[in-house]
Image (cartoon, rainbow, N blue to C red):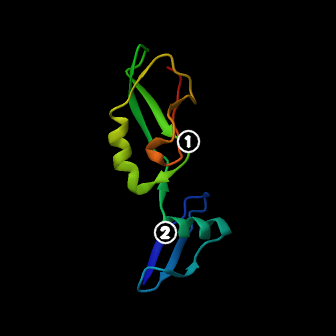
Amino acid sequence: MNKSIICTVCPMSCNVTLELDDNGEIISVSGNRCPRGKTYSIKEHTAPERTLTTTVRAVGGVHPLLPVRTDKPIPKGLLLQAMKETAKITVKAPVKMGDVIVENFLNTGANLVASRDL
């Protein structure tokens, strides 16, 4: 069985093919034009992660919403739960870009940080 993944690490956007056994274990990796493509594809197959970017409510500032993001990728399977958690958050102005809004967000080791000043 084969699985195709488009690598997004660099602008080459390699079409990497993972050959998998019946249990979904990786047998071989092909199609990557650099070592980073191989690493990315294996990680994307075994434990995909994404950086969460969203907004939280804000009071006392010029804008009613504050853009936030995680400072490192979190497991892709937690994105829906993460969005539900951010919907509960309200911050008070002033906030500076980079300020930590929630430390160790969802016990992932990633912090939820402000993406702009408020």
Q: Quadrant of residue 12?
A: bottom right
Check disc 2: other Cα within 10 Å, few if <14, some if 14-19, many if 20+: few
- The N terminus lies in which quarter of the figure? bottom left
Q: Amino acid at mark 1?
A: Asp
Above or below, 76 relative to 113: below
Residue carrying label 2:
46
Residue carrying label 1:
71
Q: CA distance from mark 2 to mark 1?
A: 21 Å
Check disc 1: other Cα within 10 Å, few if <14, some if 14-19, many if 20+: some
Above or below, 92 relative to 55: above
Mark 1 falls on what kind of element? loop
Is residue 11 found left or right of 66 in the rendered image? Answer: right
Nearest to the observer: residue 106 or residue 79:
106
**Which residue corresponds to the image point at 54% horizontal and 72% vertical from the top-left?**
16
Q: Earlier in the sequence, mark 2 or mark 1?
A: 2
Q: Amino acid at mark 2?
A: Thr
Residue 36 location (% of width, % of height): 64, 65
Nearest to the observer: residue 111 or residue 55:
111
**Which residue corresponds to the image point at 49% horizontal and 38% vertical from the top-left?**
69
Q: Quadrant of residue 21?
A: bottom left
**Which residue corresponds to the image point at 40% horizontal and 33% vertical from the top-left?**
55
Is residue 52 found left or right of 29 in the rendered image? Answer: left
Residue 110 location (% of width, % of height): 53, 44
Residue 5 location (% of width, % of height): 48, 69
**Which residue corresponds to the image point at 34% horizontal and 49% vertical from the top-left?**
80
Mark 2 falls on what kind of element? helix
